[in-house]
Image (spheres, rainbow, N blue to C red):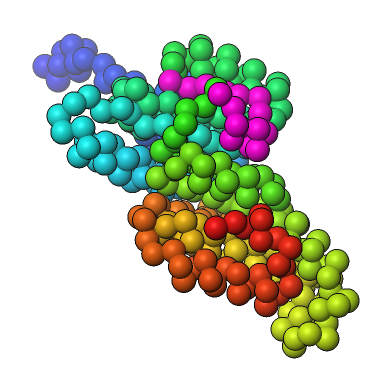
């Protein structure tokens, strides 16, 4: 009897990739993860890819509530009318890991994607072409990729007049400042920045070091070359935060955990709240004057 029961018993179905790999979120496109070389062609996940996926998920956790906030604001304003969806611009998109995974998890078949759009801005034409082809293959109709610099994108007619969310992750040196300029001019509701290679301010500090050394004891902070570089990087981000606050944004600065391979892991998240602007604007001018960076007032405009 037991043998007959065993022979007639139904075979247990093979586990799905989602069961085998708990890191993969339910419903996530397996084809996309293979195309991004996060999963192998056999559907395996190696240690390096697991770490990369963890990093992108960490960023998604920060961005998801921002997308939800945009939808909530649209819903309140629409009063029953159709929602507009969410527009997001990713500057320095590279291979667009973040853009594709954001679209797959937060836009595809979701309210954010109904009329919403993700734009990837990238200067390397071959990466723009590959991302465009991949989006077409996957049917990600709400994604576009533009072969532009960050500065060029601000004036481009290929982008809408206003953008809801702006991201710039490891946009080198002044590209982060160009992304802030883009976000301010596009009246972005949310801005997500991971600054990188902040060399411009350090070069100005270095240039003016001789005349500034006798002016204030504070110049000892950046007298030595290595300190000039590190202090230049730090003060750049301080000035960026003050600039955003001087435009009415609420700013949060935290660490992007999980990016152990890079020392550039400072995450700046700014949300437009129409906050009082006078004090941060005054502070910004005071800091510029104190460290001898008055000539950079146009870069960190208010």
Furthest toward the left, the residue is: 1
**162 displayed left or right of 243:** left
**In-front residue for pair 199/132:** 199
Horizontal side of residue 273 vs 260, given as left or right: left
Residue 293 in sight here: yes
Counting labels gives: 0
Residue 173, horizontal then vertical, whole percent: 71, 50
Q: Is residue 262 visible?
A: no
Residue drawn at point x = 27 percent, y = 20 percent: 12
Residue 146 painted magenta: yes
In the picture, measured across the screen, residue 228 lies left or right of residue 256, that is right
Looking at the image, residue 170 lies above or below residue 126: below
Q: Which residues are magenta?
A: 142-157
Residue 63 appears at what percent x and percent y? 41, 44
- Image quadrant where one finds the N terminus: top left
- Kindly indicate the quadrant of the structure image that contains residue 139: top left
Q: Residue at x 42, y 46 (%)?
A: 190
Q: Residue at x 74, y 73 (%)?
A: 292
Q: Is residue 191 left or right of residue 260?
A: left
Residue at point 65% right, 38% down? Answer: 151
In front of the other: 260 or 12 = 260
Residue 18: x %, y % from top left: 37, 29
Q: What percent of the width, then of the height, locates residue 191?
A: 47, 47
**72 or 4: nearer the eye?**
72
Quadrant of image for the C terminus: bottom right
Looking at the image, is 150 positioned above or below residue 209?
A: above
């Amino acid at each position: 009897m037991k043998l007959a029961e065993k022979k007639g018993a139904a075979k247990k179905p093979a586990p799905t990739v989602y069961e085998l790999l708990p890191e993969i979120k339910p419903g996530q496109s397996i084809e996309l993860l293979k195309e991004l070389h996060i999963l192998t062609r056999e559907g395996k996940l190696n240690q390096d890819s697991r770490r990369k996926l963890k990093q992108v998920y960490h960023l998604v956790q920060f961005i998801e509530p921002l997308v939800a906030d945009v939808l909530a604001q649209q819903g309140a304003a629409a009063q029953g009318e159709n929602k507009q969806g969410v527009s997001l611009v990713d500057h320095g998109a590279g291979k667009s890991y973040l853009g594709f995974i954001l679209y797959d998890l937060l836009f595809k078949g979701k309210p954010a994607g109904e009329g919403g759009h993700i734009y990837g801005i990238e200067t390397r034409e071959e990466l723009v072409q590959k991302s465009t082809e991949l989006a077409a293959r996957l049917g990600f109709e709400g994604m576009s990729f533009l072969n532009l610099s960050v500065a060029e994108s601000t004036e481009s007619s290929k982008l809408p007049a206003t953008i809801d969310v702006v991201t710039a992750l490891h946009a080198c040196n002044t590209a982060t400042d160009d992304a802030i300029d883009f976000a301010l001019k596009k009246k972005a509701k949310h801005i997500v920045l991971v600054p990188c290679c902040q060399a411009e301010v350090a070069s100005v500090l270095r240039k003016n070091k001789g005349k500034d050394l006798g002016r204030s004891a504070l110049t000892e902070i950046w007298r030595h070359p290595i300190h000039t570089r590190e202090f230049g990087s730090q003060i750049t981000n301080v000035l960026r935060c003050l600039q955003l606050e001087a435009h009415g944004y609420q700013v949060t600065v935290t660490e992007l955990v999980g990016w152990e391979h890079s020392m550039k892991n400072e995450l700046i998240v700014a949300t437009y709240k129409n906050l009082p602007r006078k004090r941060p604007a005054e502070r910004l001018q005071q800091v510029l004057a104190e460290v001898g960076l008055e000539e950079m007032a146009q870069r960190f405009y208010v």
